Amino acid sequence: MSQVLNAIFAPGFFASDPVRAGLVVGAVVALVTGAVGVFTVIRGQAFAGHALGEVGSAGGSLAFLSGTNPLWGYMGIAVVAAGLMEVLGVHRPRARDVATGLVLGAGLGFAALFLYLDTTSSSTTGVTVTILFGSLFTISQPMLPSIVVLSTIALVVIASCYRMLLLSSLSPELAAVRGVPVRAVAIAYLVIMAVAVSLAAETIGTILATALLVGPPATALRLTKRPGGAMAVAGLIGVAAVWIGIVLAYDSFYWPPVDHGWPVSFFVVAMVFVFYLGAGMVAALGRARRDRRVGTLLAMGESGCEPHVDADAA
Amino acid sequence: MFSGFMVNTWIAATMVAVIAGVVGFFVVLRGSAFAAHAIPHGSFGGAAGAVLIGANTILGLGIFAVGGALGIGWLSRRGRHDVATALALVLMLGLGALFLSFSVEYAAAVYSLLFGEVLGVPGDDLLPMAGLGVACILAVAVLYRPLLLTSITPEVAEARGVRPGRIETGFLLVVALATTMTVPVVGVLLMFSLMIGPAATARSFTHSPLRAIALSVAIALAIVWFGIAVAYLTNYPVGFFVGTLGAVSYACARVWMAWRSRAVGASPGLGNSRPDLTAPLSPAAPPGR
């Protein structure tokens, strides 16, 4: 038994401080992005979500330049970017794409400038890679309380306007008729998404922020159609992906090339992708079984020239 | 600024701007800004892989760009388009992070790949760039009618037997081509900005496709030339100027149009005829695209 455990969790796994911080912060961030991301997928705002995370890196590099806490840099810029997207017309379905793209382009332009100034002012050349790619293993412990508090706020806001948000996401017209302030809900959601994504981008990197915001929710929505259930499933899938990724990254120190760990981002993204494809297969199997049942019913009731029956026989 | 090695840069940048202006028009028209961002950004992973095994960077970029375009097309057949794009992007970037962690190549090279390098155009690259650029323009010319048709009136296109899925994949491949040739100059992160800013600005001024393409190319040229000149003089990254100027030009267009429509609206008789300039030519997009 202990040999099996040792094979899965390489020695020293649970004693390592970065690993423990990574497990906790990764789980918190995965739960928040999972819950927020279900609406991102339903509303078709994956681009905006990704853009907010990337634009946040401009804030991160600015904070590095000025020596303030990077989390506030990420979050400040992301919220400003969300406001700009709204002004440029993110609420109109087809202008949304261009508005998001323009804000993202400008944000990345500033990121280029700040990163350039970072590298010239401090001569730490690795800052580009750190800010743009991030790593779960470099989380600073003192940040834990603010991460947990911000996550809780995001979850509480989502929960408290859940019904309005759901209605205005599924059918804006119906929501407007029912008296839901659709525009205000959209702005509030954009800000919450900015908070959740920048939290994730600062702690685990922009790649994983996008992966966790879109992957697990899309996976969950393939498995269940109920948004509330999908939020829980997405959270669980996200936590599973992060934890498996951390275990594999830790184990990879013993893989070739020797004494060189593989990046945790790679493993988490790979897990997210595997879950997504797996859920697609499960959903396809479920559909096939339903079709077969319908086909049998049709064959019993009717004379049997329905296309369903043919499909079943094939 | 125009001596020796800089001549290559000016030639390369001019080609980049022309391609970005032409392809960008369709990117804006079709609302595929996310794919136009994801394909170059994701192809960064290919460049990192090429550096790792000592192959040509452009080859690595090209393989990942084409793979990304096909992957987005394949994933979005079963699932939402933006979800498929996001997943393809993070997968490619995850691979990029893996390659990057193995290679000894250091941060300066990564930075110039991400944000562009004015002085980094070797003369040997100009010929392949020109070849890819011509291929790009030819592909757009061949796809011109079906692209316009599927973007503006999808129903008519379908009735005429145009397969929207195939056109979409073909278009993504054009974006991949454009990406491969242009990335080494402007950088993977800012390439898409050069596609969107000028084209969106141009579309605010005219609804005629050919005129919009010409205007978009002109604006892209102005932005790139200005960006390179200032980057050369100040040493700041060219990506900063390209990224922000795209947004600035669009903002100027919006302000100018708002001012003009108010002037028109004030005169009697023309009051309510103001068109929504940011709206696309098509009345509505099919949901889930």
Image: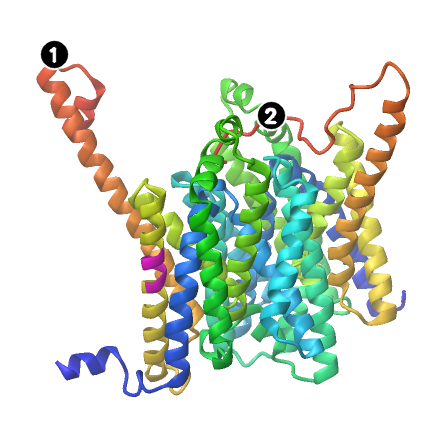
Residue at left 62%, top 72%?
A: B110
**Is residue B232 shown to the viewer in this render?**
yes
Q: Tell me which chain the residue with mark 1 is part of.
A: A
| Residue type pointed to by label 2 | Leu
Residue at left 69%, top 46%?
A: B196
- Provide residue B23's location: percent of width, then percent of height: 67, 42
Residue at left 22%, top 80%?
A: A7
Find the magenta span and give its range.
A235-239
For this rendering, which residue is in front, A257 or A152? A152
- Residue holding disc 2: B149
Give the dominant element type of the magenta stretch: helix, strand or loop.
Answer: helix
Is residue A185 rendered to the left or right of residue B119?
left
| Residue type pointed to by label 1 | Ser
For this rendering, which residue is in front, B129 or A50? A50
Q: Quadrant of the N terminus of chain B?
A: bottom right
Is residue A178 rendered to the left or right of residue B256?
left
Instruction: Classify 10 Å Cα crowding around label 1: few (below 14), some (14-19), many (20 and above).
Output: few
Spatial CA distance of label 1 from label 2 is 43 Å
- Provide residue B96's location: percent of width, then percent of height: 50, 67
- Provide residue B3's location: percent of width, then percent of height: 89, 68
Residue B273, by quadrant, is top right
For this rendering, which residue is in front, A187 or B78? A187
Is residue B127 rendered to the left or right of residue B228?
left
**Which of the two marks, 1 or 2, is nearer to us in this view?**
1
Residue A91 higher or lower than A154, as above or below = above
Q: Tell me which chain the residue with mark 2 is part of.
A: B
**Is residue B67 shown to the viewer in this render?**
no
Q: Residue furthest top?
A: A303
- Residue holding disc 1: A303
Instruction: Classify 10 Å Cα crowding around label 2: few (below 14), some (14-19), many (20 and above).
Output: some
